Image (cartoon, rainbow, N blue to C red):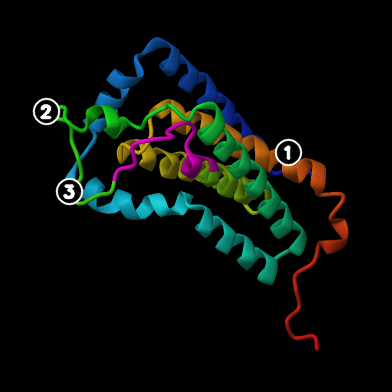
Amino acid sequence: MKMKSNLFDWCNYVYWLMALLIITQTDKLSLHIFFNGFANPIGDFLMPHLTNVGDGLVLLLFAFFVFLFRSRKLALILFIAFLVSSGLVQFLKHFVFENHMRPMYVFQHVKGFHQIKNFHYHMSQSFPSGHATSSFVLFTFIAMNYAKSAKGQIVCFIGALFFAFTRVYLSQHYFEDMFVGSMIGFLCMKYAQVFLSQSFQQLDSPLNLSKK
């Protein structure tokens, strides 16, 4: 199978190296305070809405659209990648890192820490970020199948990173939660397509709704 995501892959690898350097060289609380300093009125208004791009429901709706109008094979692969990545994230959240609390659990009473008025903050099961995982599943899928140019693949990576970062901006996750979630999403989507594409070859055609 000819892959179209070479540049997208390399963007991820560089991001991993930089993120690991940041995580290993900084304290996660100090790092989160640094990111909290990015808060501004425009971000406070937009981010609670933009973060929904990383919601699993959005990804499922996108997969349904692909199933109806593009390719049943690709839609099924995307759905399986979502199930595997989401299952892994939920297992880690609930059974391995269930005691990892979210940023607002720590910072809710810290003077000067920015909070968005009337925004609902989660307190527990912080690691890893499910929204970051879904964002990278979605944009890795787009990069592999529809981003034919280098510019398109770079845009896909920036999109995945931006929507994952909304979780850090909103203090729903630490940077390390976002980082691990993004790795899970990228790897699950990439290898789901690599290993399943040939098996689902017979489904590689759009669904024709005009047939009776």
Q: Earlier in the sequence, mark 2 or mark 3?
A: 2
Residue 117 located within the stretch drawn in magenta: no
Q: What residue type is labelled 2?
A: Lys
Mark 1: secondary structure: helix
Q: Which amino acid does label 1 sit on?
A: Tyr
Above or below, 194 against 199 in this view is above
Q: Please state which of residues 112 and 18 is positioned toward the viewer in this rendering.
A: 112
At label 1, counting other C-alpha atoms closer than 10 Å, the crowd grade (few under 14, some 14-19, many 20 or more) is: few
Residue occupied by mark 2: 111
Q: Calculate the distance from the C-alpha at mark 2 to the C-alpha at mark 3.
A: 15 Å
Q: Residue at x 23, y 53 (%)?
A: 45
Q: In which quarter of the image is the N terminus?
A: top right
Magenta region, residue range: 121-133
Mark 2 and mark 1 residues within 8 Å of each other at the beta carbon: no
Q: Residue at x 65, y 48 (%)?
A: 83
Q: Calculate the distance from the C-alpha at mark 1 to the C-alpha at mark 3.
A: 41 Å
Q: What residue type is labelled 3?
A: Lys
Q: Mark 1 or mark 3, which is nearer to you? A: 3
Farthest residue in the top direction? 25
Residue 111 image point, x, y percent:
11, 28
**Relative horizontal placement of residue 122, taking residue 163 as reference (left or right):** left
The part of the image, by quadrant, that contains residue 191 is: top right
Residue 91 image point, x, y percent:
59, 36
**Relative horizontal placement of residue 77, taking residue 163 as reference (left or right):** right
Let me know if residue 7 appears in the view. Answer: no
Let me know if residue 60 appears in the view. Answer: yes
Q: Which of marks 2 and 1 is nearer the N terminus?
A: 2
Q: Mark 2 or mark 1, which is nearer to you? A: 2
Q: How many labels does the image show?
A: 3
